[in-house]
């Protein structure tokens, strides 16, 4: 501390460097300078929080739907691979899943119109060896 004389409040004096620094500051320092008031960002924040929350919720819903479809596909694949069948399934061929009177699940090439077993669904084996469920018209479906 170099100079012991008291400076007026509006004077910006740095005692470490012994210099007046009012001209170096990014804001006014004299008593007639305009009042510094912080910008109210509440509206801006609320608007953007709403937008971000909407975007996150939308992405979450999309991921949730994909997850649910994937879990349905997992369940059917697990069911089919644990079913009884005595042939090697061919990629692209349509097969039908049934439950017999004893509660055993089995896979067959016989269509539901040609037998009296409890029909569970029609499936096609894809190139990745994943079973894909088909609807009654032979189109892909992931509904249970």
Image (cartoon, helix red, strand yellow):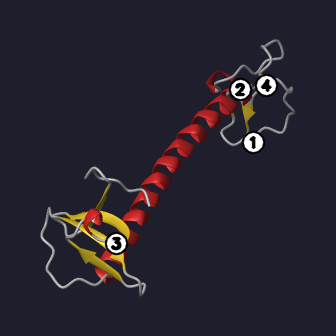
What residue is at 58 percent from the left and 38 percent from the top? 54
Q: Which of marks 4 and 3 is in front?
A: 3
Marks 2 and 3, Cα distance to the nearest angstrom? 66 Å
Location of mark 4 (residue): 11
Residue 91 lies left or right of residue 102; in this view the side is left
Residue 106 is left or right of residue 30, and the answer is left
Q: Badge 4: few (under 14), some or many (20 or more) residues near its Cα, within 10 Å?
A: few
Say few, some or many: other residues with alpha carbon within 10 Å of mark 2 (under 14 / 14 to 19 / 20 or more). Answer: few
Cα distance in 3D space between marks 1 and 2? 48 Å
N-terminal label among 4 and 2: 4
Callout 1 touching callout 3 (CB < 8 Å): no
- The residue nearer to you, when weighing 93 against 63, is 93
Measuring 72% from the left and 24% from the top, which residue is drawn there? 39
* CB-based contact (under 8 Å), mark 1 and mark 2: no
How far across and down, in percent of the image, does residue 66 sit? 42, 54
Q: Earlier in the sequence, mark 1 or mark 2?
A: 1
The structure residue drawn at horizontal position 84% and vertical position 29%, both measured from the top left corner, is 7
- Measured in 3D between alpha carbons, the distance from the residue under mark 4 to the one under mark 2, in whole angstroms, is 36 Å
Q: Mark 1 points at which residue?
A: 2
Secondary structure category for the residue under label 4:
loop
- Closer mark to the observer between disc 1 and disc 3: 3
Mark 1 or mark 4, which is nearer the start of the sequence?
1
Secondary element at image label 3: loop
Residue 43 numbered tag: 2
Q: Decide: marks 2, 3 in contact (CB < 8 A)?
A: no
Q: Position of residue 137 (x, y in %)?
A: 28, 49
Instruction: Kindly report which numbered mark, 4 or 2, lies closer to the viewer in this rendering.
Output: 2
Q: Residue 116 carries which label?
A: 3
Above or below for 114 versus 40: below
Quarter of the image holding residue 30? top right
Q: In which quarter of the image is residue 117?
A: bottom left
């Amino acid at each position: 501390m170099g100079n012991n004389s008291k400076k007026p409040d509006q004077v910006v004096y740095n005692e470490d460097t012994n210099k007046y620094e009012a001209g170096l500051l990014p804001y006014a320092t004299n008593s007639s300078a305009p009042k510094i008031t912080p910008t109210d960002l509440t509206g801006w924040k609320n608007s953007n929080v709403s937008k971000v929350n909407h975007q996150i919720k939308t992405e979450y819903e999309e991921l949730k739907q994909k997850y649910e479809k994937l879990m349905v596909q997992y369940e059917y694949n697990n069911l089919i691979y644990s079913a009884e069948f005595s042939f090697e399934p061919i990629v692209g061929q349509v097969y039908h899943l049934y439950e017999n009177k004893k509660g055993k699940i089995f896979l067959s090439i016989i269509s539901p119109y040609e037998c009296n077993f409890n029909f569970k669904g029609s499936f096609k084996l894809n190139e990745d060896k994943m079973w894909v469920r088909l609807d009654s018209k032979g189109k892909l479906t992931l509904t249970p």
